[in-house]
Image (cartoon, rainbow, N blue to C red):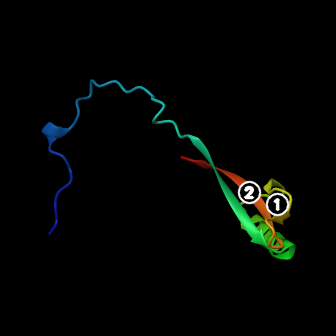
Amino acid sequence: MQENFLPNDSELPSNDVSFQASSDSVPRKEFVKIMVIGSRKEITSVIKMLHTLRFAEAGEWSPIMPHGESGEMMSVLRKKVLG
């Protein structure tokens, strides 16, 4: 069963409405953190792969550092997204 989602002419807003830019209409910049955890070799491989895919520059990642006491390493990327 199909329904018509287009409004009737009487439901359309009039043309005399003025629009003002509000802070809600401006995209906000938000950040996410992406963590890669594993061996130094695995982390370097993932960083290179994401660089090849143009997801992030290799230099945007944090230095590879120890992660807890498991012997694993980690690197973090802080990526800007539009919200």
In the picture, the quarter occupied by the N terminus is bottom left
Residue at (80%, 73%) from the top-left corner? 70
Give residue 39's mark.
none
Q: Position of residue 39 (x, y in %)?
A: 83, 75
Q: Residues within 10 Å of mark 2 (few under 14, many from 20)?
A: many
Helix, strand or loop at disc 2? Answer: strand
In this rendering, position of residue 82 left or right of residue 12: right
- Residue lying at the far front in this picture: please name it: 69
Q: Is residue 13 above or below residue 39?
A: above
Q: CA distance from mark 1 to mark 2?
A: 9 Å
Q: Is residue 72 above or below residue 63?
A: below
The quarter holding residue 30 reads top right
Q: Position of residue 72 (x, y in %)?
A: 81, 72
Helix, strand or loop at disc 1? Answer: helix
Q: Nearer the viewer, residue 32 or 25?
A: 32
Q: Which residue is mark 1?
A: 58
In this rendering, position of residue 83 left or right of residue 36: left
In this rendering, position of residue 3 left or right of residue 69: left
Type of amino acid under label 2: Leu
Type of amino acid under label 1: Ala
Give residue 77's mark.
2
Q: Position of residue 63 (x, y in %)?
A: 86, 58
Q: Nearer the viewer, mark 1 or mark 2?
A: 2
Residue at (79%, 65%) from the top-left corner? 67
In this rendering, position of residue 15 left or right of residue 42: left
Q: Nearer the viewer, residue 12 or 72?
A: 72
Residue at (16%, 39%) from the top-left corner? 11
Q: Nearer the viewer, residue 70 or 65?
A: 70
The quarter holding residue 49 reads bottom right
Q: Position of residue 58 (x, y in %)?
A: 82, 60
Q: Is residue 43 above or below residue 81?
A: below
